[in-house]
Image (cartoon, helix red, strand yellow):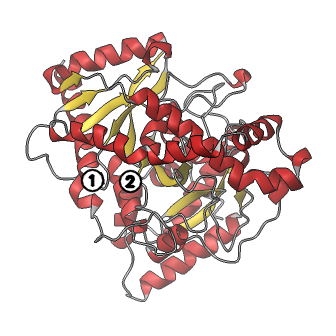
């Protein structure tokens, strides 16, 4: 790793977004070696306090970067992420790095091959810079990671390290995963962009499975354009994943950058958890509604309380099914919270579980009907700003889990702030219409920015 990089040079490179960095490398304006070195310098300076990385080998990262530069100098074609560093949540298999699931039980685990999504990123030219901290088995037990955007507060979970690494400027993008709210909630807490695609858009093969019905690979980035780009690079059908579906490449990057053909209409769904949310969130969303005016309409959807409960049942039961053998073999190496959760999941009646799974399509049809009139659903991304670390919690996924259950794409956009703490706005789209969702999210961000500048 280079040791003579000036602070100004480090900042100018480490703060580049994913798409901007890829363009500069493709044009020969910067080398991958310089970019990765700048990111490693940033990590060296900041990660002692934040604790975003579970595994990092600077020499290995630099070897990848130099190899990328050598390839480019041959004049050969380069992928859309050529030479750009990406961090990966430590539940996603990487053949050249440990994948330990945030658990001492799997300490030293070395996968034999990359997860499908990692192979796709490498094919696009990305540098896998290291593995980020996950909560234990990607569930709710807090990790030691700190929130760089809100010192003294949790970064959320379970994609704690991925959100923190992006928020601290260590990497332009990181992979996370979501079973309830593990991408969108950390994004909201850390003031970055989170994107959970439609279920099945990104393969889960080689990713720790805790719920085949719910698990979704997602991303944390510095912009919506960056989120679209990295998901484009991973979104190919995989026959090895049962939820992966046949389609052409979606070209999210192109779709997200287009202006909407007509001004979008948004529907505000408070969900049954609204009354229990932080009163500061209520005030922030009232201001947001005022700013959007007639663009935003509030609608009551009674089925939402049922969906929240169905998601909870499905996750509990499937957690117990996949993690039960771990509980049987290593009960003393699991936290109390994990053990209690798995015992509770094992007690879910079979009929109750099957009914919760079977209810999904009818529930989705009722929510999908909203899209005949509205471009996207707007809701909070979290019940409020990030809880303090001493509370010993990662926050509630109550505003996210229902959309994960329905397999719908969702983004968290860092548009709000209360008492100096970030607060995301969540937009939810129709299944398999991720491009429209991202286009609407771009429109929303630009519209609010224009309104702010005008005032």
Residue at 40% over, 13% down:
282
Q: Locate residue 18: give its quadrant.
A: bottom left
Q: Residues within 10 Å of mark 2 (few under 14, many from 20)?
A: many
- Residue 172 seen in render: no
Quarter placement of the N terminus = bottom right
* Residue reaching furthest to the front: 351
User: Percent from the top left, x then y, of residue 377?
Assistant: 29, 34
Q: For marks 2 and 1, give the CA distance.
A: 8 Å
Q: Locate residue 153: give its quadrant.
A: top right
- Residue 444 seen in render: yes
User: Percent from the top left, x then y, of residue 429?
Assistant: 30, 44
Task: Report the residue marked by disc 1.
Answer: 433
**Dot 2 lies on which element?**
loop
Above or below, 434 relative to 167: below
User: Percent from the top left, x then y, of residue 198?
Assistant: 38, 53
Left or right: residue 436 compared with residue 346 = left
Above or below, 281 relative to 133: above
Tell me, for residue 162, which label it has, or none. none
Quarter placement of the C terminus = top left
Residue at 91% over, 45% down:
332
**Do labels 2 and 1 touch, CB within 8 Å?**
yes
Left or right: residue 295 compared with residue 117 = left
- In this rendering, the count of numbered labels is 2
The residue closer to the viewer here, 107 or 58, is 107
Task: Report the residue marked by disc 2.
Answer: 198
* Residue reaching furthest to the right: 332
**Dot 1 lies on which element?**
loop
The residue closer to the viewer here, 369 or 276, is 369
Above or below, 421 relative to 155: above
Left or right: residue 132 compared with residue 177 = right
């Amino acid at each position: 790793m280079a040791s003579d990089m000036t602070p100004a040079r480090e900042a100018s490179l480490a703060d580049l977004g994913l798409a901007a960095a890829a363009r500069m490398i493709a044009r020969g304006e910067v080398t991958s070696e310089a970019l990765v070195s700048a990111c490693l310098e940033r990590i060296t300076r900041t990660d002692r306090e934040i604790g975003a990385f579970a595994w990092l080998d600077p020499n290995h990262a630099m070897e990848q970067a130099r190899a990328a530069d050598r390839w480019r100098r041959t004049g050969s074609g380069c992928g859309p992420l050529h030479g750009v560093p990406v961090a990966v949540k430590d539940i996603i298999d990487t053949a050249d790095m440990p994948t330990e699931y945030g658990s001492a039980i799997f300490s030293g685990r070395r996968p034999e091959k990359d997860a499908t999504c990692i192979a796709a990123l490498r094919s696009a030219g990305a540098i896998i810079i290291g593995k980020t901290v996950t909560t234990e088995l990607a569930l709710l037990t807090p990790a030691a990671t700190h929130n760089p955007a809100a010192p003294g507060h949790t970064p959320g979970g379970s994609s704690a390290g991925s959100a923190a690494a992006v928020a601290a400027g260590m990497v332009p993008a990181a992979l996370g995963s979501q079973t309830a709210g593990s991408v969108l909630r950390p994004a909201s807490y850390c003031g970055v962009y989170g994107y959970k695609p439609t279920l099945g858009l990104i393969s889960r093969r080689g990713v720790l499975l805790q719920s085949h019905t719910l698990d979704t690979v997602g991303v944390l980035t510095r912009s919506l354009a960056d989120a679209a780009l990295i998901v484009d690079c991973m979104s190919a059908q995989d026959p090895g994943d049962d939820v992966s579906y046949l389609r052409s490449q979606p070209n999210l990057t192109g779709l997200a950058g287009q202006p909407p053909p007509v001004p979008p209409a948004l529907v505000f769904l408070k969900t049954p958890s609204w009354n229990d949310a932080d009163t500061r969130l209520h005030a922030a969303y009232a201001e947001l509604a005022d700013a959007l005016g007639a663009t935003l309409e509030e609608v009551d959807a009674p089925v939402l309380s049922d969906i929240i409960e169905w998601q909870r049942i499905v996750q509990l039961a499937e957690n117990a099914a996949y993690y039960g053998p771990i509980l049987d073999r290593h009960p003393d190496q699991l936290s109390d919270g994990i053990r209690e959760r798995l015992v509770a999941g094992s007690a879910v009646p079979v009929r109750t579980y099957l009914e919760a799974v079977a209810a999904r399509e009818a529930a989705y049809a009722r929510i999908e009907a909203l899209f005949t009139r509205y471009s996207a659903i707007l809701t909070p991304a979290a019940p409020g700003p990030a809880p303090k670390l001493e509370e010993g919690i990662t926050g509630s996924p109550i505003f996210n889990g229902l959309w994960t259950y329905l397999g719908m794409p969702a983004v968290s956009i860092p548009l709000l702030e209360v008492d100096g703490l970030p607060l995301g706005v969540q937009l939810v789209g129709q299944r398999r219409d991720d491009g429209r969702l991202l286009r609407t999210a771009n429109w929303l961000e630009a519209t609010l920015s224009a309104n702010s500048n005008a005032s």
